[in-house]
Amino acid sequence: MQSYESERLYLKKIQLNDIDDSFMEWFADEDLMRYYTNSQRKITKEDIINSIEEGEKNKNCFTYGIFYKETNDCIGTIKLGPINWVHGISDLVVLLGNRQYHGKGLAVEAIKLGNELAFQEYDIRKLFGGMYESNVASIKAYTRADWVIEGRLKGHYLNDGQVEDRILVGCFNPKYFK
């Protein structure tokens, strides 16, 4: 695998020893998880390990750690998948879990690295995703990382008993989209 790095970050496949107590704290942070999972269920270490192993076994979902170069700390994750190999499309989910690194433009940097990884390493034609309309930080991060808003699903989510739209975003591999 080619290395994927930017000025401040690098990506590498997540290893079991990366999933330590501080890593697991991210998944206990209700505010972070508010937008991360559609099920609103608690994510355990076993869930994460099973997801990583299942994705690797099926060759359709890959999880990378986002590492801060200066300290080599794992500060988040990028999950590529599930990949639909027939259509060359995939979701790309970025979680900047370590709050010390929020507000520094690192999410944009990480998403751009995820784009490169998906397009170059996996030959993904198009990345797609969706987020709560109220998750303004994610919408801004993705659009600043060369993604575009493709649409809106009206009233898609129930958020604290209120309906909320899902904003659909996409990013296109320039190899396939001139």
Image: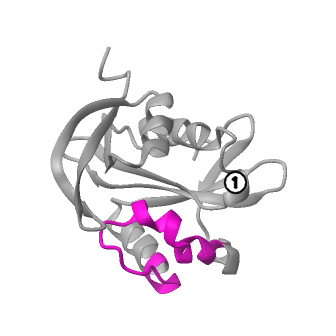
The residue that appears at 35% across and 61% down in the rendered structure is 59
Q: Position of residue 14 (x, y in %)?
A: 59, 65
Residue 118 in sight here: yes
Q: Is residue 8 left or right of residue 12?
A: right
| Front in this rendered view, residue 59 or 67 | 67
Coloring scheme of the render? one colour
The residue that appears at 28% across and 42% down in the rendered structure is 167
Magenta highlight range:
23-48
Q: Can you identify the residue that label 1 sits on? A: 67
Q: Is residue 79 left or right of residue 167?
A: right
What type of secondary structure mainly makes up the magenta span? helix
Q: Position of residue 162 (x, y in %)?
A: 24, 61
Q: Position of residue 53 (x, y in %)?
A: 44, 75
Residue 32 drawn in magenta: yes
Amino acid, disc 1:
Phe
Residue 147 drawn in magenta: no
